[in-house]
Image: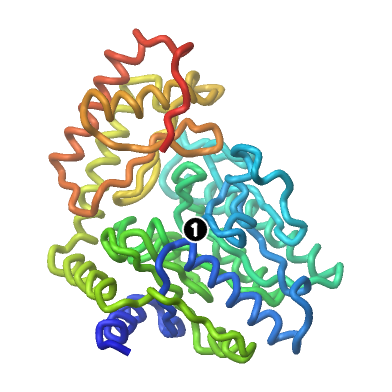
Amino acid sequence: LHQNASLLASKLAGLLPGPLEKVFFVNSGSEANDLALRLARAHSMARRGGGTRDDRRHVIAIDHGYHGHTLACLDVSPYKYRQGSELTSYPDAVRRVPCPDTYRGIHRVEAEGLTEEERLEREAEAGRVYASYVERECRSITSSGGTVSAFIVEGGMSVAGVVLPPPSYLKRCADAVRGAGGLYIADEVQTGFGRLGDGCEWAFQYAGRGRHREEEEAAVVPDIVTVGKPFGNGLPLAAVVTSRDVAGSFESTGVEYFNTFAGSPACCAAGLAVLHVLERERLRENAAEVGGHLLGLLSDLKSRTPWLGDVRGSGLFVGVELVRDGTTREPATAEASFVCSALKERHGILTSIDGPDDSVIVVKPPMVFGRGDAERFVSCLERVLVDDLPAASMDRVGRTPT
């Protein structure tokens, strides 16, 4: 191997918990998640002593989740089944569970008037309830003679509308899946490398960061982690990181993994530079400090305008949910599209729209985003909400593609 590949693999593995030390380089997040699913299936087959493709193919995925554009990734991306006519029926071997959204989901947390401890306990209870759906699917699969190969989930769910799982959720899900013979795949393609701040290199660490009892009990280490997007800073670079045990199961299948361009010296040099700049310029700490400032400004804005139903996230991974009515939480879908377009066209600010109702303005700026940038963004957002939106006609607003 070229020294860039081996050095980058070593540095990447060094950022992850102990058992995660085998690195496969690929070119994109989609390739990473596709390979992660193959690793999980191979490990499931090895545990069963062989078998057919079908009996190791059961995967549990989050409703409205997204993990890439290969066929295998689309199978576990329910979000894509709501778009167009290409995908019409969910695969039988993929089980969908509700997104653990405590604002708009089926189990909500009413945080108004609660102390921090009370809110955390309510969220932990919601996490237990949401995890019960994964536990139920595991029982259903195994009781019918099937095998769970994997549970794939983002530690911070972007397409679902910037949803951070409540405490205990990931730990309980991972325990259930492992108990059924499967693996926990953490998709960190959008949220990895310190974006969430708060002392978290990875989003899967967010619930277990240990500031409260519920959080201390929620710590969990994935079986497979996938990274991509910012890893090469524009160059095609992504990776799958797993344990020697899982990698060994994959190698035992005899099906060699070969990728023509993955781990090229040039792309690995970019990855090394990214990790170096993250450290040298303290961009993880910047995400925590500036992200906290941004969330504070947005929370203050929320108190001044009825359009903001919820402000959530961590670090530089922030969601602003627009509603037409704060009590009923009616989603402001057309209004969100208008706001996203107005920010771009009138102020040169790029955001995106996500969530099951396309009503969440997603803010995922570059890691060099500063306090002044945060203040300008919130100022421009307020101008759009207060000055532009009331005078706009929603009849002519189409969905803003993001």
Name the quadrant containing residue 283.
Answer: bottom left
x then y, percent, for residue 324: 48, 19
| Residue sitting nearer the eye, 361 or 341 | 341
Image position of 162 (left or right of 46): left
Image position of 41 (left or right of 369): right
The amino acid type of the residue labelled 1 equals Glu
Q: Is residue 129 above or below residue 295?
A: below
Q: Is residue 10 above or below residue 199?
A: below
x then y, percent, for residue 5: 31, 82
| Residue sitting nearer the eye, 68 or 311 | 68
Identify residue for label 1: 154
Residue at 54% x, 71% y: name it.
36
Quarter of the image with the C terminus in it = top left
Spot the residue most to the right. 144
Residue at 59% x, 70% y: name it.
37
Q: Is residue 315 above or below residue 356?
A: below
Q: Is residue 176 above or below residue 309?
A: below
| Residue sitting nearer the eye, 220 or 111 | 220
x then y, percent, for residue 24: 44, 79
Name the quadrant containing residue 144.
Answer: bottom right
Quarter of the image with the N terminus in it = bottom left
Q: Circle 1: is it few (<14), some (14-19), or many (20+) Cα within 10 Å? A: many
Residue at 50% x, 89% y: name it.
244
Image position of 208 (left or right of 60): left
Residue at 34% x, 26% y: name it.
341
